[in-house]
Image (cartoon, helix red, strand yellow):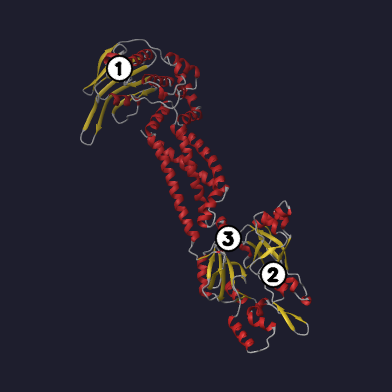
Amino acid sequence: MKLCNINKTYHNKNNTVVVFQNLNLELPNHGCITIYGESGSGKTTLFELIAGIDKDYEGTVENDKKVEYLFQEIELFENLSVYDNLLFATSNHNEINELLKKFDMTNLIHQKVKKLSNGEKRRVQIMRSLLNHPDLLLMDEPSASLDQKNAALICDMIKQLSHEITVVITTHDEALFDNVADISYRIEYQQLTLIKQNHESQAVKQEAEKKKKSVQIKENNLKMSLLYLKAHKLSFLVSIILLIMFSFAAYTGFYYNDSGGEKQRHNVWNYSTNLIYTFPNVCESTPAKNSNYIDKHCEKYDLFTLHDMNKVIEKNNDIIAYALEWDSGIYNVFDYESMEQLEKDVAAGKQISAVDQLKRTFYSYYDVFQTIEYVDGEETIANFVNPEANYVDIKGLRYQLEELNETPRVFPYELVQPDKLPLIVGKYPEKNTEVIIADDLAQALQKIYGYDSLNQLIGTQLTFYTGHEGLMEKLPDDWGNKDLYLHVTISGITSYENMFENRMYFKRNGFQSTLADIYHYDVNKLKVHGEKFLIDPSKDTQSVLDDLNVNSPLVNDSYHIFNGENNVYVEWSGKINQDQSLMKKLILVLLVICLLFILLQRFFFKKQLIKEAHIMKQCAYSPIKIECFVNLFVCICAGVLSFLMLIGMIPALNQIALLLFNRTILDWSIKHYIYSLLFVIIVYELGMMLYLKYLTRG
């Protein structure tokens, strides 16, 4: 080991400091060399030149030896035991045990390093360095911070070690190491001055042993990763918690990145945000006496025909399905002017038949439904059929469906664009009496019928009652078909559900044509008080609404978005997009917070991480590789726990979202989970690798 004509200069802001000028040093193959000098004289700089740490110099350094550098500051894994610390250097248990006996540390083998005295820590540090089988051991102030007894012990150890390897010491304490040193130098005037020298024989280590050790180290990276993980159990537990939060945020982020996808369309459909519902604009609400019930009468409104509705559909390609509305329980159809005239005619003594009275009073029924008369020599009575066109009930299944928390009420719609309604099984309706039902209703029917799969429902007949209670008993004998039931066959099942309505989809004009056959009315003369339009869920409902207000024949500005919950009508304000934008911002904030906490947690242990990275380098391990193995293990643990957490939390989060946004925000998706987990692993691994590389860049 030689240093020849070394010139070393530090260039500071204000001046230039010359540390060495034409310095020369040759180290023997064994013995103890002490280097004395005042603080700032260059002792540490000399060690950095010998160890190859400092390469900014003039001159030459010849070195073919394995060098171990023990810094003045003790570098150990504080949370590991003495034995675990030594395992970083070798997995040869016999060699470790021999050193423990030699250094009188056997009784402290399982003691954590942080509970040792400074003298004991120094001995552990020396043992670990010796297990790396160095040719040259550099010890910077080995007696610093030690009491007299421990300092003497260290001196004795150095004396023994110097018979086998070269030990170089920097120290202020000449008296302590005078009897130990074989060669002594003093740094003065930018040179090394020899102040003592003697000669002794030495034992030289075999190169083969070093090569064997090098191979052994390379095979133990994974084992050392487990030791490293053990040294930071609490720290990595905190990392796992933060990564679970990070995984959750990433998963949610990937979900919302799929906002134009099938799941988002399903949500829009499920919570009626793609439904435009027309209803009368001028209504009177009267609270009923001794009740919370509100009696609502809408006396002024337009009546719409199928011809009006077809014009709307022809002008708008975003309408998927429609339904006609008639609810005589809310919207009365009395012609008050005709009724007033009728009262005047009766008061004037005019003879008016019952049928004529009804024709003059219920003007809309006259255009829609046939008159039913009992003919016993004179006109005596007339009944007008008023089918409940708002919804129908599944006959015979009311109680079974209610027990399954499923309403028997079914709302009939007619399809304009069937291909926009995705099917799970079956086909689109081809006959007027074929229908598609939603998945939630289909699953309830599957349980009631005891079927093994939804496929068995295809071809099943359902029966619905369309008339008022007791209406069949009032029909005359010559009515003909007294079957007021609607018989339909399930042709398909759609994945698009709605939490407020059970929907049944006919082919276009299928429901009205079937209903007209039952009640013998002319479907072309049908007039209704309102219409419902289901809009393509991937389209902007607001633009469709604006277009309807301007271009449709439904002229009284009565278009509103129906959100389905509690029969409340709300103006459209782009709420889905607003909620989505807000959620994305919250997700981004959560992601940033998690990353900051992970970095802050590592920054808190910055000093210790630098020490431990240096230990691993001294023991011929790669800190980057070990960190990679450990972080991968942490990510896997966090991935498993976040998997379990998401399965449990998603239903609860959806309940909260229903209260706040009237819709769910998350659903379980293996694809999204895999994406988010890969994203978390890549970001975390890269981040930690770059951070550790930054810490160990010197």
Using the image as rendered, state which of residue 567 and residue 168 is in the foreground. Answer: 567
- Assess whether mark 2 and mark 1 are in contact (beta carbons under 8 angstroms): no
Residue 289 visible (yes or no): yes
Q: Amino acid at mark 2?
A: His
Q: Determine the residue positioned at 30% across, 23% down.
A: 3
User: Pointer 1: what residue?
Assistant: 34
- Residue 138 location (% of width, % of height): 35, 21
Question: Which residue is the site of mark 3?
Answer: 269
Image: 394 above or below 216: below
| Residue 323: quarter of image | bottom right
Secondary structure of the residue carrying tag 3 is: helix
Q: CA distance from mark 2 to mark 3?
A: 31 Å
In the rendered image, the quadrant that contains the C terminus is: top left
Question: Which mark is first along the chain, 3 or 1?
Answer: 1
**Residue at (64, 86) in percent of width and height:** 346
Label at residue 221: none
Mark 2, residue position: 468
For the residue labelled by badge 1, is the local secondary structure a helix, a strand or a loop? Answer: strand
10 Å crowding of disc 2: few (<14), some (14-19), many (20+) = few
Counting residues from the start of the chain, the first of labels 1 and 2 encountered is 1
Query: In the depicted view, which residue is nearer to us: 112 or 27?
Result: 112
| Identity, as a three-letter code, of the amino acid under mark 3 | Trp
Instruction: Give the percent coordinates (x, y) of residue 425.
Output: 68, 57
How far across and down, in percent of the image, does residue 69 sit?
36, 24
Specify the quadrant of the image occupied by residue 486.
bottom right
Question: Which of the two discs, 2 and 3, labels the residue nearer the N terminus?
Answer: 3
Q: Residues within 10 Å of mark 1 (few under 14, many from 20)?
A: many
In the displayed structure, does residue 239 sit left or right of residue 171? right
The amino acid type of the residue labelled 1 equals Thr
